[in-house]
Amino acid sequence: MNSCLPKHLRVTRNYMTTRRPTETLAQRLAGTAEAFHGKIAEDGPFKPEKDRYHMYIGLFCPFAHRANLVRHLKGLQDIIPISVVRPYPKGDETGWPGWKFPENDTEYPAATVDPLFGSEYLHEIYFKADGEYKGRYSVPCVWDKKTETIVNNESAELLRDWQTAFNSVIHPENAQVSLYPKHLRRRIDEIAEWLGRDLNTGVYKAGFAANQEDYDKNVLPVFAALNKMEKIIDENGGPFVLGKELTEVDIRLYCTAIRFDTVYVQHFKCNLGTIRHDYPQINNWMKNLYWNVKGFKETTNFKHIKENYTKSHYDINPKAITPRGPFPNIEDGFESDFSKIKVGSINIPAVLELEQKLP
């Protein structure tokens, strides 16, 4: 399973290299044997400073995409440099040896070397932080050059924390950017719960289903969530999910929606419908973000996305052939008046029944 998945969907590997003392610096400051939960803050060990932190990401991963999007929207590109792993290979069924860096910056387009340590694999970074680390070697992963450990590798935490973490060291205009405004927090949290469960991770539950029964059960909530989101965008009138303000909900939805027609429809068998043909409101919303809102197009790489899924999941696609389509990867032609866009839906009774249960 893809190691950029949330913790509850990952398979762990009991693998060790060079052993270190039982309690490592990483464990004291940030992490556990499975994940790191450090927070950058003025009153903690990880203080906001320029060029102190380095983020490792994969452009293919929707969860790493979240963190990179916040990095762009908050104007943190000069504060936090990044390294980008190759989209494949990812290793065996347990995740070993994991994501690989290119040998040089021209070997694979948009993939980069590790400038800090010259690492061959991402797992080397994890073992530098904790020689007995037993979790997945996942992206995103944030390294602190001062304390020489991993700060955090949980995208949901970075999505929230990075909105305020560097406000004291960035331009005041960027410091004002918030994706979690107080007056919308209750609604954001409400949507995030079912969006994460039924769509963001739902496509993986359908795609990695081990049998027909599991697939049939897990593919339905994906489209119930899309049906619901289609109506929410229509009700709020765009250009963003909750109306006039860009919020976390847009980030959470975009990172899955931009991959939907490109890979999830065919690769994960989520083919009860497509964004471009069955969800006009979502499609129009997504086109606006990609073409008109700085940061979205810049952090989206369709080559990395398509080749990661099709060339890493050998049990799903054993010949590792990457389809040429769909064409184009994303359509153009944004309509600013959302009232002119019809509201789509997948009208399968089982999908509609699940949709009705969403808040």
Image (spheres, rainbow, N blue to C red):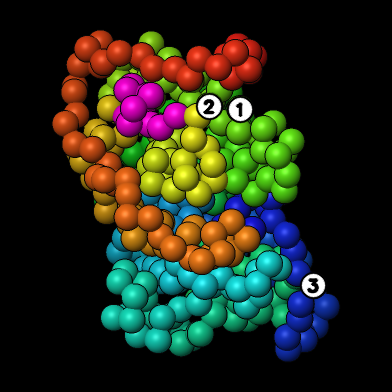
Of badges 1 and 3, the one in the foreground is 1
Secondary structure category for the residue under label 3: loop
Q: In which quarter of the image is the N terminus?
A: bottom right
Mark 3 — residue? 14
- 3D distance between C-alphas at marks 2 and 1: 6 Å
Of badges 2 and 3, the one in the foreground is 2
Which residue is more in the foreground, 163 or 314?
314
Q: Quadrant of the C terminus?
A: top right
Magenta-colored segment: predominant secondary structure: helix
Secondary structure category for the residue under label 2: helix
What is the span of residues highlighted in magenta in the rendered image?
Answer: 273-283
Q: Is 74 displayed left or right of 190 in the figure? A: left
N-terminal of the two: label 1 or label 3? Answer: 3
x, y (%) of residue 97?
Answer: 62, 78
x, y (%) of residue 331?
Answer: 23, 38
Which residue is more in the foreground, 258 or 71?
258
Residue 300 vertical position relative to residue 232 in the rendered view, above or below: below
Q: Do the residues labelled 1 and 3 touch (CB within 8 Å)?
A: no
Who's the residue at 50% across and 29% down the image?
272
The numbered dot on residue 223 is 2
Residue type, numbered disc 2: Phe
Q: Are marks 2 and 1 in contact (CB under 8 Å)?
A: yes
Mark 1 — residue? 220
Residue type, numbered disc 1: Leu
Query: Is any part of residue 119 visible from this angle?
Result: yes
- 3D distance between C-alphas at marks 2 and 3: 36 Å
Residue type, numbered disc 3: Asn
